[in-house]
Image: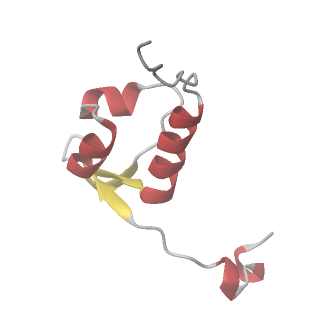
């Protein structure tokens, strides 16, 4: 599908989350987030003079989906039993 064929209903703007909010939501540090296999790829917002990313962010929908997928992988816990 070409960009010209994208309908208005398909045009949605996703929120970009800065590193500090992704760290807070996941409990992981930036270095882990950018290297963790399976974690969503970041979006480069600005570059340093040497060509490395200076400011990065993540799409909120992708981070949310990753968190939900991780939660779904949990083993069910047994309800605590009452002492006899």
The quarter in which the N terminus is drawn is bottom right
Q: Residue furthest front?
A: 84
**As drawn, is 1 to the left or to the right of 52?**
right
Q: Examine the rendered structure and indicate whether residue 68 appears above or below residue 13.
A: above
Camera sees residue 51: no
Please give the name of the residue rendered at 59% of the width and 28% of the height, measured from the top-left corner: 73
Q: Count how many numbered circles sit on residues in the image.
A: 0
79, 66: nearer the viewer: 79
The x, y position of residue 76, in whole percent, is 58, 25
Quadrant in the rendering for residue 53 = top left
The x, y position of residue 47, in whole percent, is 26, 51
**As drawn, is 33 to the left or to the right of 62?**
left
The x, y position of residue 84, in whole percent, is 44, 12
44, 25: nearer the viewer: 25
Q: Residue furthest top?
A: 84
Q: Examine the rendered structure and indicate whether residue 45 appears above or below residue 33.
A: below
**As drawn, is 12 to the left or to the right of 9?**
left
The x, y position of residue 59, in whole percent, is 44, 56
Please give the name of the residue rendered at 40% of the width and 67% of the height, measured from the top-left corner: 15
Please give the name of the residue rendered at 51% of the width and 25% of the height, measured from the top-left corner: 79
Please give the name of the residue rendered at 54% of the width and 21% of the height, measured from the top-left corner: 78
10, 46: nearer the viewer: 10
Camera sees residue 17: yes
Q: Examine the rendered structure and indicate whether residue 79 appears above or below residue 58.
A: above
Quadrant in the rendering for residue 4 = bottom right
């Amino acid at each position: 599908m070409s960009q010209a064929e994208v309908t208005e209903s398909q045009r949605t703007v996703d929120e970009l989350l800065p590193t500090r909010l992704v760290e807070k939501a996941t409990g992981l540090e930036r270095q882990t987030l950018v290297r963790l296999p399976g974690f969503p790829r970041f979006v480069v917002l600005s570059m340093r003079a040497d060509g490395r990313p200076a400011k990065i962010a993540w799409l909120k929908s992708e981070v949310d989906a990753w968190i939900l997928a991780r939660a779904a992988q949990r083993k069910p816990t047994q309800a605590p039993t009452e002492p006899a």
